Amino acid sequence: MQRFARLNAVYSSDLERLRSIEEGGYVLVALADRECPICGAPPEAQVHDHGGREIALAHAAAAAETRKIEVEQCELTQTVLALRGEAASLRRVVKELTDQIEEIDSQIENDRPLEAMARSNYETYASARADLQRVVDVYTRRAELVASREEIDGQSTKREGDALAVGPDSTVAFAFGASVKAVLKEWKFPDADKAQFDLLTNDIMIGGKPRSSNGKGVRAILHAAFNVALFVYRIEKSCHIRASWRWIRLC
C-alpha cells in the first residue's frame, strides 16, 4: 500500500505537468490563427508560423499521455481498493483463527486431566495385555510340547521284542559275572559262588539278592569287587568295554 501510494503520487505529479503542457499548447495553438501580436499582420499575411505545428503535436502528445496516465491511475485506484478489501477480509480471518486458537487452547487445558487418566489407563492395560500375552504364549508352547510328546510316544510305541538293547548282551554279562564270582572267591566272600551280574538291574546279585539290598559295608565290598572284576575281565578278554555309569547303577 505504501508503494502504491508513492506510485499514485508520481501519477498525480505527471498529470499536473502534462495538463500544464496541454493548456499552454492550447493557448499557443489558439493564438496562431490571430493577428501577430508583434507586427499586427493578419494570419494570411504572416510569413512565419512561429512553430504552430510543433506546438500542436506537443499538445496532442500531452493529451494522449494524460489519458494514458489517467487510465493507469484508475486501475491503480481499483487495485488499492481491492487490496484494502482483501486486507479487511484477512483481518477478519486472523481474528476468527485467533479466537479458534484460544478456544482450542482452553479445551486442551480442560482435557489435560482426562488425557493423563487415559494415558495411565492405557499403560495399565498395555501391561496387563503383555502379561496375558505371556500366559497365552506359555499355553501355546505347552500345547506344542504336548503335541510333540504325543507324536514321540506314538512313534516309540513298539512291541516288547522290538525294544532296543541297552547295555551288555547276555554273553558279556555271563562272562563278567564269572569274573566277579572269581574275585569274590579269592576274597573268601560268603556265597561267592552264587554271584552273578543281572542284566535287568545292571548290578551284582548274590544268591538272587541285589547289591542294594545289603548293608553299607557289603555294598562297598561288592562295589570294589565290581571294579576289580572289570579290570580282570578287560585284561583277560583284551578288549575295551565302556563301563558307562548310565547303565551300570552302582549306588
Image (cartoon, grey):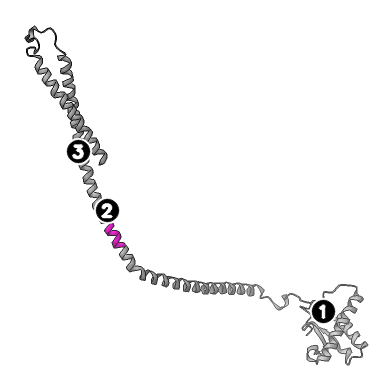
Q: CA distance from mark 1 to mark 3?
A: 124 Å
Query: Label 2: few (<14), some or many (≥20) within 10 Å?
Result: few
Mark 2 or mark 1, which is nearer the start of the sequence?
Answer: 2
Q: Secondary structure at mark 2?
A: helix
Task: Name the residue located 31 percent from the left edge and 65 percent from the top edge.
Answer: 107
Identify which amino acid the numbered label 3 is placed on: Thr
- Identify the residue position indicated by label 1 in the image: 170
**Which residue is most to the front?**
38
Identify which amino acid the numbered label 2 is placed on: Val
Q: Give how far across and how far down residue 221 sits, in percent.
A: 85, 88
Towards the viewer: 178 or 221:
221
Asked whether disc 1 touches disc 3, contact meaning CB atoms under 8 Å apart, the reply is no
Q: Magenta span covers which residues? A: 94-104
Residue 220 figure quarter: bottom right
Towards the viewer: 73 or 168:
73
Query: In the rendering, which numbered label is found on residue 94?
Result: 2
**Looking at the magenta stretch, what is its main secondary structure?**
helix
Query: Label 3: few (<14), some or many (≥20) within 10 Å?
Result: some
Q: Is residue 237 left or right of residue 20?
A: right
Towards the viewer: 16 or 93:
16
